[in-house]
Image (cartoon, grey):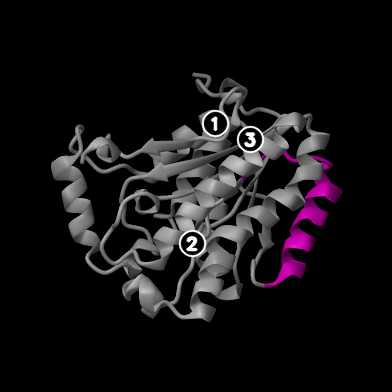
Amino acid sequence: MKPIINLEGKVGLITGIANEKSISTGVAESCIEAGAKVIITYQNEKTLAFLEPIVSRLGVEDVLLLDVTKPETMDEVFAKIDAKYGKLDFAIHSMAFAKRDDLHGRVVDTSADGFALAMDVSTHSFVRLARKAEPLLEKAGGGSLITMTYLGSEKVIANYGVMGLCKAALEAATRYMAFELGSKNIRVNAVSPGPLMTRAASGIAGFDGLMAAAVDRSPLHRLVTPEDIGALVSFLVSDAGRNMSGGVHFVDAGYNIIG
């Protein structure tokens, strides 16, 4: 049976895979099932070991080093994509980081260097990725950029701290870049999943409580999965999503509508 979403002939870059439970794992799986050729990245040699079973299972050929705190690695990623494929149809940004004290502490107590680091990795890295991807997306006749956000961007979530500010800025960047790149047929969107247990989420105090509340209070009374997020992303990067840009798209069983 042919997939509903068709990504045959498309080449996509997917960042942020840490292990089988990562959001980006579900995204990669959905895009590959729809026919896309996928390039995935890893942060360092330590994280590469966790990717190996995923790479093997999904049959991914291109696994590249990308540490957004080291600009040369981003340069190398896009140079290799250009050399091998000569284009890029979509790129998925799924990276965030904040120092533990800044994440769990009060926003008013955030250190200057911690704030700068969180914004650099969580927000400005998407801007840098978009700038590097732009020429390759143009070669494809246009394409799609997607980042991952969270409800903490617009509502106060306990223990989310400075990351809430980063996600708010990330969503603003999504809108501005959608405006700036639209004339080149490049779409920019943000996907906002409900709470699910990933390696990143495990660092947020009380996250089990957030998941329990999502099940209890959301209209559909269930948690989302990486596969649910992958299904939305594969739609957005496909031709079916060709007129969707600049939006924040929730996949959270309706939790975001609850006051």
User: In terms of secondary structure, where does tag 1 sit?
Assistant: helix
What are the residue bounds of the magenta stretch?
A: 70-91
Mark closest to the chain's N terminus, 2 or 1: 2
Residue at 50% x, 73% y is 115
Residue farthest to the left, as pictured: 216
Q: Is residue 88 above or below residue 170?
A: above
The one nearer the camera, 59 or 40, is 40
Crowd tier of the residue under label 1, counting other residues whose Cα lies within 10 Å: few below 14, some 14–19, many 20 or above = many
User: In terms of secondary structure, where does tag 3 sit?
Assistant: loop
Query: What's the amino acid at mark 1?
Result: Leu
Residue farthest to the front, as pictured: 108
Residue 86 part of the magenta-drawn span: yes
Q: Which residue is mark 1?
A: 236
Number of the label disc, if any, that sits on residue 18:
2
Q: On the picture, is 218 further left or further right than 55? A: left
Q: Position of residue 109 (x, y in %)?
A: 37, 79
Q: Which residue is mark 3?
A: 36
Q: Is residue 58 visible?
A: no
